[in-house]
Every structure is written in structure tokens, then in C-alpha cells.
Amino acid sequence: MAGQGEIIAVENLKHTYDGKQYALDGLTFSVRKGEIFGLLGKNGAGKTTLIKALTTLIKPTSGGLRILGLDPRHDGKEIRTRIGVVQQGESFDFATVEGNFDIYGVLWGVPKSVRLQRREELIKAFGLQDVRKHRAFDLSGGQKRRVQVARELMHDMDILFLDEPTTGLDVIMRRELLDSVRERTRQGLTVVFTTHNLEEADYVCDRVAVVDQGKILAMDTVENLKRLYGGKKTVEVTLSGGDAAGFFGALREKLAGCDVKSDGNSGVILTDDPKGTLQRVLEMSQAAGVQMDWLNIRKNTLEDVFISSVGGTGRENNGST
């Protein structure tokens, strides 16, 4: 099933927890060696279920799945020795920060000399020098997250799965962590990365898949996804008064060939004729008696791909599963 250079191969993967509704509904994709593959989706989209299947934590209901050429149904133990996983939930020992690194190294059978060297390199790389003697439980949320990601790198692996790895990090540390992940891929590591932060995905991912209700709605490089719109641009609309739902509903009917998405008083319109669309919006707003707070034309972004794929204006996408 896997092609040349593919170290994850998924074919028509399905999973249901209750036998009625599918959390994963026919996913097919592959991940190549040395790339960062991003999974984007709203709450309940199926991203965390997919990570659990890829890391052998659950057995999918049906479909094909190969990890590093191995079948998780029979080779789960060997797969687990060759991957790293950073999940959303906290998992700490009662040890200090440096003690957590040591414990991880011992558990993975890393020789002492190598273990000590890696511990020092990671503590420095992730800015943990000042808290290395502190108990992990006593750290701030952002510091805990840095420890979780850094200690996973104590052992050698082929694939690293990161489920919302930057949660709780400030802007500077988030960028430094993403740069560290990117550097590891240059050394041959493959990363599967879930995030609700579209800017992060744009910055670090080689390819992204937009997931919703257990299905992949769009998948390609970030640049190619943006090109899906060709010459289209986005018209942004924010209302300050009037019947917003009725107004955006009327826009959908009248603006043939345009993709209109709305959430409350705000909406976006993807169009081939931004100036003409802008004029039509103004005319319709005057006729409908609605007041405008904001009306703007801009180029498309990865967020527009996401909005077009899953619906809404993106404001509800503040978490991930």
C-alpha cells in the first residue's frame, strides 16, 4: 500500500466508538519521510482519534494502515519503539525537570553518556536552564509544555506526533519550538502536527490536511491550497446593525459563483470580481437597511482555505480534537 518514500500510508480508514457514528470516515493519505504534515480541524473533527490510530493507541474499525512499513494490528510494539508522541494532556513524574529527562532516557534505554549530553542540549535549546532543578508539577503551563516536547526528543525516533504542541507558549517560545521541530526534520525526522493555529501551520508545515467530521476535505502544500482560489480574493464584511442572518442569506442567493460564509455579524466572500462584489454588497446593504462596521478586500490566506472547507468564519475554531 505504501509508495516509495512514504512512511505513513492510510487507506479508507474508518473508526467508530459506538457503532453508529464514524469519528474517522474513509481517510486516505500518506506522509513522506522528513516532512511536517499538519492536521487542521475544528473540535470533534477527528484529529485526535486519527493520532490515536497512528500511534497504536486504538485499533481502527476498518481500512488500511501502515506505519514505517509495519501493520499496527500486528506490529504495534515495534512501531512504538520507533515513534515519539506528545499528547495534549499533561504527563509528569514527581521529579525535577532534569530528572524527567533522565527518567525518559532510562525508559528508552539511552546510554548514560548519551543521555546526559542530550539532556543538556535539550534543556538549553528549550530555555529550561532556570527551572531545571524545579519540580515539573510546579512549572507554569508554558514551561510544562516545553518540557513535554523536549523530553520526547531524548530518544531516537523516525516519527514524532505532536498534538497541539504549542498550547500555553508565548509567541517567542512558540516560534523557537517550531524552528526546533523544523531543524529536526532536516535531520530526517518526520512530524505529524495537529494545530488549530493556522498561522503555525502556514509557517511550519510542508503539507496540510483539513479534516472535518472524520473526512479530509482538502490536502496539499500550503501554497497549492492557496492557489485553489486562482485569482479570487476575499471580501470581508462586518455589520453593526440590522438582520445579519437575513443579509448574508440574501448575499448567497444574489452573488452567483461566490462562496459566502458568515458567523454572527461577520462574513467573508470569496470572489473572482472583488470590486464588483464590493459594489453589490454596498447596494444590498443600503436596500436592506443594515449598517456596515467593516468592508475590505484582501488576498487569500490558509485561513480562507480552512473556512471554505469546513464552513463558518473560523471564530469557532479555538480548539482541536
Image (cartoon, helix red, strand yellow):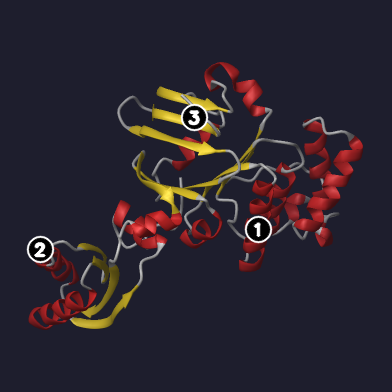
User: What is the three-letter code of the residue carrying label 3?
Assistant: Gly
Q: Nearer the viewer, mark 3 or mark 2?
A: 3
Decide if residue 87 is in sight here.
no
Query: Which residue extends farthest right?
Result: 113
Q: Nearer the viewer, residue 19 or 249?
A: 249
- Number of residues whose C-alpha sits closer than 10 Å to that of mark 1, classed few (under 14), some (14–19) or many (20 or more): few
Give the residue displayed 68% in from the left and 52% down from the top: 183
Expressed as whole percent of the image width and height from the top left, the position of residue 207 reads 48, 49
Decide if residue 222 is in sight here.
yes
**Residue placed under numbered mark 1 in the picture:** 179
**Residue placed under numbered mark 2 in the picture:** 253
What kind of element bears circle 1?
helix
Residues at marks 3 and 2, CA–CA distance in whole angstroms = 45 Å
- Number of residues whose C-alpha sits closer than 10 Å to that of mark 2, classed few (under 14), some (14–19) or many (20 or more): few
**Residue placed under numbered mark 3 in the picture:** 3
Q: Nearer the viewer, residue 101 or 19?
A: 101
What kind of element bears circle 3?
loop
